[in-house]
Image (tube, rainbow, N blue to C red):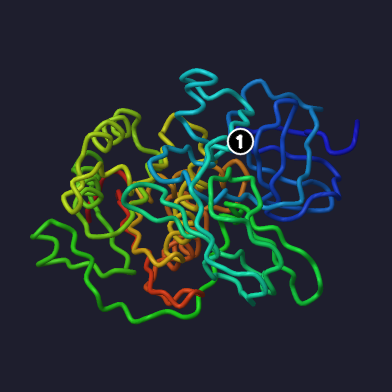
Amino acid sequence: MEKNTIYSINGPVVTVKEATDFHMLEMVYVGEDKLLGEVISISRKKTTIQVYESTTGLKIGEPVYPTGEQISVILGPGILTNIFDGIERPLKDIADKEGIFIPAGSDVESLDTTKKWDVTIKVKMDQYVKSGQIYATIPETSMIEHRLLIPNGISGQVVHVEKNGLFKIEDTVVKIKDDQGEIHQLKLYQKWPIKTPRPISYRLPISIPLVSGQRVIDTLFPIAKGGTAAVPGGFGTGKTMMQHQFAKWCDADIIVYVGCGERGNEMTQVLEEFSELIDPRTNKPLLERTVLIANTSNMPVAAREASIYTGVAIAEYYRDMGYHVAVMADSTSRWAEALREISGRLEEMPAEEGFPAYLPSRISQFYERAGYVKTLNDEDGSVSIIGAVSPQGARLF
C-alpha cells in the first residue's frame, strides 16, 4: 500500500496506518476529491482524521495529503452580508457555480478574489508598526468600515506603500521589513486558525449592558457586552426565535449568527428574514452588519463542530477592529451532540449521557473567547456569546 493512504472509514472518521508526516490539528485533504479534514489523533500505528464533508463514495487506498497548516478562516473584506457553511465556504457562490447541493471537495474561494475594494492606506513610509495596528481601511458596507490589521507576530519598518485606490484582496498594499530583515507583504486579508483565540492587550471589566431590545430580558436577565448567556428550553419552545430577536434588535455593531445543527427550514427563515429587515438605527438593510454561518442538521456532522469556531474567529477579528460583536450560537446542544457522535466513532470512553469526558472543557474553551477587551490597537472591543441550550429529551429540570 502506498504511503499516506486511507486504511479505514467510519462515517466522518478516517484513519491512516503508520503515517509519520502529519501533525496534531493539521488540515489535510482526504481522497481523490480532496475532502477537507483535520488530524485529531496520532499514534505510532495510526493517524485519525475527522472529515468535514460527506465521506460517501470514499474508498480504502485513496491518498491523504498533508498541508502543514491548521484549519483556518480567511479574514478580509467581503465577510459581512455573506452566508457561509461551517468551514467558511460561501453558499451563494457555490449555488451559482455548482448548483444548490454542495459537491464533494468544493474549492470555491471563501472571499471574492475578483472584486476591487476602495482602500485607504493608514501607514507611511519608514514608519515603525506592530501587530494589531491598522494599516488600511475599506468601506465594506455602507454601515461598517473594515480595518485591516497587521497580522500577529509581524512588526517592523514600512518599506513600501501603495497609493490609495482600488485593489483586489490578493494585491499587496504594504510591505514591512522586520527586525530580522525579512520582508512581509500585507494584502487585504489574513488567515487565522479557528481554534486559536486571537491575541489581546488585556481584558476589561464587564460592566456595560448589551441592550437586547427585549424589555423583559433587559429587566430580569440583563446581558453584558463581552458576557455570555444561555437561552434554555426544550425542542420547539422558541429558543431560535428568541435568538432571532436578539440578532435583530440588540445594540451590537456586528452580528454573527451560527446555525449549528439547526433544521433547514429554520435557517431558510433566517436567511429570508435577514435579507428583508431594516436596521432601526440606520434605516439600512440589517444584513449589512451581519454574517450568517449555516450548518444545518443534514450537513456533515463534523463540520458542525467547526462552525462554532469559525463564527467566534470571525467575531474576534471584528472585535480587534474596535467593534462590539454578538455571536448567536444556535445551538450549543447540537454542537455537543456532534462531539458525542464523533467520540462514539472514535470508541472513546463515554461520560454522562454518552457525551465525551472532555465536553465541559470544550464548552469552557469556547465561551472563554467572549469578553470585553483592550485590543492590540488600543481600542475597546467585545465579543458577546448567546447560546441556545436544549436539555436531553427536552427535559427542563
Out of 9 and 113, give the one closest to the viewer: 113
Q: Secondary structure at mark 1?
A: loop
Q: Is residue 15 left or right of residue 98?
A: right
Kind of residue indicated by mark 1:
Pro
Q: Against 192, is 27 above or below? A: above
Out of 212 and 317, give the one closest to the viewer: 317
- Give me the residue at 43% from left, 59% from top: 318
- Give me the residue at 23% from left, 46% from top: 239
Q: Is residue 227 among the parts visible in the rendering?
A: yes
Q: Is residue 29 left or right of residue 103?
A: right
Q: Residues within 10 Å of mark 1 (few under 14, many from 20)?
A: many
Out of 134 and 381, give the one closest to the viewer: 134
Q: Is residue 52 left or right of residue 312?
A: right
Q: Against 262, is 332 above or below? A: below
Q: Residue 264 at x, y = what percent?
A: 35, 29
Q: Residue 201 at x, y = what percent?
A: 50, 79
Out of 34 and 77, give the one closest to the viewer: 77
The residue wearing badge 1 is: 12
Q: Total number of numbered labels?
A: 1
